[in-house]
Image: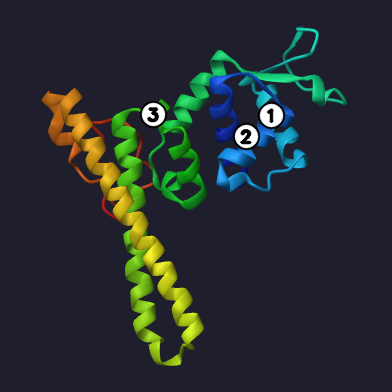
């Protein structure tokens, strides 16, 4: 499955976690709430829904309140409501608990962050710190590139590059504020394990999972 397809599945499961929705409502919320999916089409949405139904993670209910499990979205798409199954809730929690580098990247991070309320504090911390680490790496690379090509860049390209740097710096500051808030809350609710909340996860490998006792490897 493509990375975008996996993100779309997570977003659908997260939205259905709150309430059942039909296809049009799902598309509207994906487009209106999650910026990564402004361009999601029915041509992408319905095959994804079909796959989730086939795996038993969501179920379909027709307008006559008759449940159907399995494929066959057919021509009744406008009359079918989708809802999360017990297996789907477990899968959603499993996906939300993944804290490796994939969860720090641009679209993945946005979707994870949209559903942070359903993640544990240690998972939120790992993802936030991983995201900050990745952006700090980008800043270092961008500054070095800027120094190397300063004399060969016209003023408009230089201005665009400066704008990108400032945007990234603002996000790093925002992440640092969120991390401090999460750490403070973690220390308050977990006084016996406060030290673990202060351990950075920068540079964690893709095999990293969400448990509070895990060790992160340096890249």
Q: Of the numbered discs in the image, which one, if any, rests on residue 11?
A: none
Marked residue nearer the N-terminal end (3 or 2): 2
Please give the residue where the numbered disc 3 appears in the rendered image. 119
Mark 2 residue crowding within 10 angstroms, few (<14) / some (14–19) / many (20+): some
Gap in Å between the C-alphas at discs 1 and 3?
A: 24 Å
Q: Of the numbered discs in the image, which one, if any, rests on residue 29?
A: 2
Task: For mark 2, give the secondary structure.
Answer: helix
Judged left or right of residue 198, residue 151 is: right
In the picture, the quarter occupied by the C terminus is bottom left
The answer to whether the residues at label 1 and label 2 have Cβ atoms under 8 Å apart is yes
Marked residue nearer the N-terminal end (1 or 3): 1
Against 20, is 138 above or below? below
Residue 162: % across, % down: 41, 74
Which of the 4 image quadrants contains residue 209?
A: top left
Residue closer to the observer: 193 or 211: 193
Which of the 4 image quadrants contains residue 26?
A: top right
């Amino acid at each position: 499955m493509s990375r975008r397809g996996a993100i779309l599945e997570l977003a659908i499961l997260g939205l259905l976690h709150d309430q059942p929705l039909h296809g049009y409502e799902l598309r509207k919320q994906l487009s209106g709430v999650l910026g990564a999916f402004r361009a999601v089409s029915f041509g992408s949405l319905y095959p994804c829904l079909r796959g989730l139904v086939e795996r038993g993670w969501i179920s379909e209910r027709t307008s006559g309140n008759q449940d159907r499990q399995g494929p066959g979205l057919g021509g009744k798409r406008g009359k079918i409501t989708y809802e999360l199954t017990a297996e789907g809730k477990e899968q959603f929690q499993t996906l939300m608990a993944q804290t490796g580098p994939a969860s720090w990247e641009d679209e993945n991070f946005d979707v994870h962050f949209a559903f942070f309320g359903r993640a544990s504090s240690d998972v939120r911390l790992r993802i936030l710190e991983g995201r900050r680490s990745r952006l700090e790496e980008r800043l270092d690379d961008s500054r070095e590139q800027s120094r190397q090509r300063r004399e060969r860049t016209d003023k408009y390209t230089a201005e665009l590059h400066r704008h990108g740097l400032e945007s990234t710096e603002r996000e790093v500051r925002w992440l640092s504020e969120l991390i401090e808030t999460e750490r403070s809350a973690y220390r308050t609710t977990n006084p016996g394990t406060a030290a673990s909340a202060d351990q950075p996860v920068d540079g964690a490998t893709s095999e990293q999972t969400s448990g509070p006792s895990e060790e992160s490897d340096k890249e």
